[in-house]
Image (cartoon, helix red, strand yellow):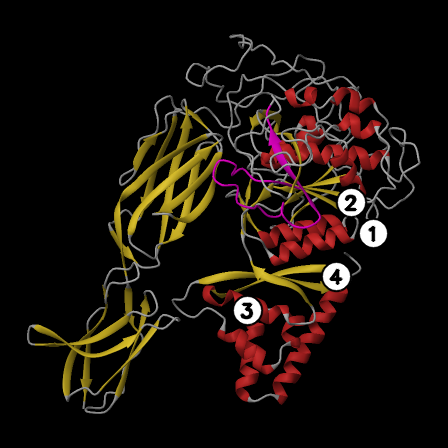
Amino acid sequence: MTSTRPARCCAALVTVAAVAALSLTATPAEAAALRAASAAGLDAVVTAELTPAEAQAFVDALPQRGESAASLAYTVEAGGTLAVDTVEVAAESVSTASRLLDAQPSVVAAGPDTRRSLLAGDLPDPYARSQWALARLGAQQARGLPHGTPPVVAVIDTGVDGTHPDLAGVLVAGTDVLTGGDGLTDSEGHGTHVAGIIGAVVGNGIGVAGLVPDARIMPVKVFGPDGTAYSSDVAKGIIWATDHGAKVLNLSLGSDTPSAAEASAVRYATSHGVAIVAAMGNDGETGSPTSYPAAYAGVLAVGATTDTDTRAPFSSTGSHIGVAAPGEDILSTYPDDRYAWLDGTSMATPYAVAALGLVLGAWPSLTAAQAVSHIEATTTDLGDPGFDDEFGWGLIDPVRALSTQPDGVTAEPQPTGTVASGGAGGNGGSGGSGTPDPAPPTDPAPTAPAPQPDPAPTTDPAPTTDPAPPTAPAPTTAPAPTAQPAPAPVAGSTQPLPVDPAPAPSTAPEPAPSGGSTGTAPAGLTVTAAARPAAARVTYGSTVTVTGTALLGGLGLTGTARLLEGARTLATGSVRAGTFTLRAPLQRSGTLRVSVTSGSRTAVVSVGSARTVAAGVSWAATSSGRARARTAFRADVDAPARLRARLEQKVGKRWVVRATAPVSAKGTVAFVWSPPRGTSTLRVVVPAGYGAAAGTSALRRHTAR
């Protein structure tokens, strides 16, 4: 990257000069269009490739005042790598702008910049059983088999807590694509949990254990503090990890909307010999919509299983699934020296990543595609014989994968700890760039004893005051976790009791704010929600913010919240530590509801009363002031296009319609009327229609002479 960055900057300077030169030979209108395209933030290389007509078409696609905007993501070839950029365009012009950018020589792909969500679900009782998944996968036996030196795995997620004692010495240099940081902070906890599943230190006498005893994990932070990410940021993370030596990418994230920029980043990584593993999604009980990046070509998609080898109810199904792995009641590391149980295909994905890393360490000559095929070929068949849409080829089996010679490979597996001198399995494979391994771990060497091949305990340690029963207690009878994080474990001590990652809330549910409501699902899931503004009549297109809590037996949990209007989903967000925030523009009348799903539980509550979304109208400019002359009266209207607005004059006590005109897609309306001599009192009225209530402007006094 350091060698290409100056060239990128120089190229930008050259193309800016080219744009300026082209502007000198273009007509004034064409030159203005080119300058406007550049000013809108369009990449300088791409701007220089636009013809004047294309530049004008792009300018026409930019959002105008009062018009909804959408983010367009595109990737550009730059010095042997890909650069990801975004630009704001009018929401209704995304397809047009995408096709326009796709036609430029330097653009690899362009499309809407869609949101990505974490795919972790319910937070069960903290006294549930311990790491059952390691016993099911034969972790102790797998760790003892020859597996060379596993390659660097990038966890593209919410970051990883770099101070967690169970990840000491495991993390290598990473990044935060949002801030330019090192990726070693994690306010959400999701990335830290995923990292611990792969490579929490084994045999140090504290906490939990990962599947890979000698893992190297690269934290790549792509999520903001609200628990969501844009596909453009995920694309940047994929490219950064590929360019900095990661050979396996963990993507425990997704949404049901594909992204051209993200797909091009996936192609870039796979063309450089990188294996990509992604979560299938947690919508198995709601129709299993296809989730991306799991559904992109070349990605190993992972579903989730229970401790009885059944499909986890939440685990999405589909023909693109590759394998399945444990994903329910998964105990792992959590920020601030804590541990937590989480459910989700997010938790299943790192187990598959870990198995893939062990295979690539054992046989470094394998390409990424060969290693994935080997993982699929050595699974334990579940469900229908052979491949099926619930489990793919079956449950991953690390022991079988390391005990079975891959097809076409005659070499013995590398002894554990052996560093391969080269091969097709690294970034140099499949036409890769030969990027060297990343910098050594950023964490200091752990003070605990050297890792031993001891298995992680498979039973829950007894708490100090109230022994845990052999089966998970019901949420209503489970003792509330301590409100303080567990202290940092001490080497050689007994295994510390994992704690709920959120402080224990008050035993009484939080009362619903004014205008909100509370709902309770049969399983005990209690949801409260309130909307702002709370008025029954709000302006068309204005943003409504819904905040709320989701509690199970008085404890905050993790899940997914959706803001609904009728059958439409206005917004989707994550529930973290029992709280959520949803925001969406209101563009039609109807009762708002909030649906919260956590594991197999769902609760739906109404938010206030039915809302009337009113059109917003404001005067844009004064008229010419000439009497009996055709005069344009303009207004800005925040209302659905195609409605016909009215220009009305007050005559005595009545309002008389003087002109009508349609609301344009850009949110403007222009009336033509010949005003009489004298002073007239005027207003603009937008009728109800297309889900919006009527709106009226402020009065204006107009004098014509």
Asked which secondary structure carries label 1, the reply is loop
Residue at x 55%, y 72% (from the top left corner)? 39
Residue at x 67%, y 57% (from the top left corner)? 264
Location of mark 4 (residue): 5
Q: Earlier in the sequence, mark 4 or mark 2?
A: 4
Q: Earlier in the sequence, mark 2 or mark 1?
A: 2
Q: Amino acid at mark 2?
A: Ala
Nearest to the eye among marks 3 and 4: give it.
Answer: 3
Q: Which numbered tag is attached to residue 369? A: 2
Location of mark 3 (residue): 97
Residue at x 32%, y 56% (from the top left corner)? 588
Nearest to the eye among marks 4 and 1: give it.
Answer: 1
Q: Amino acid at mark 1?
A: Ser
Q: Position of residue 5 (x, y in %)?
A: 74, 61
Q: Earlier in the sequence, mark 3 or mark 4?
A: 4
- Mark 4, Cα crowd under 10 Å, few <14 / some 14-19 / many 20+, is few
Residue at x 54%, y 21% (from the top left corner)? 499
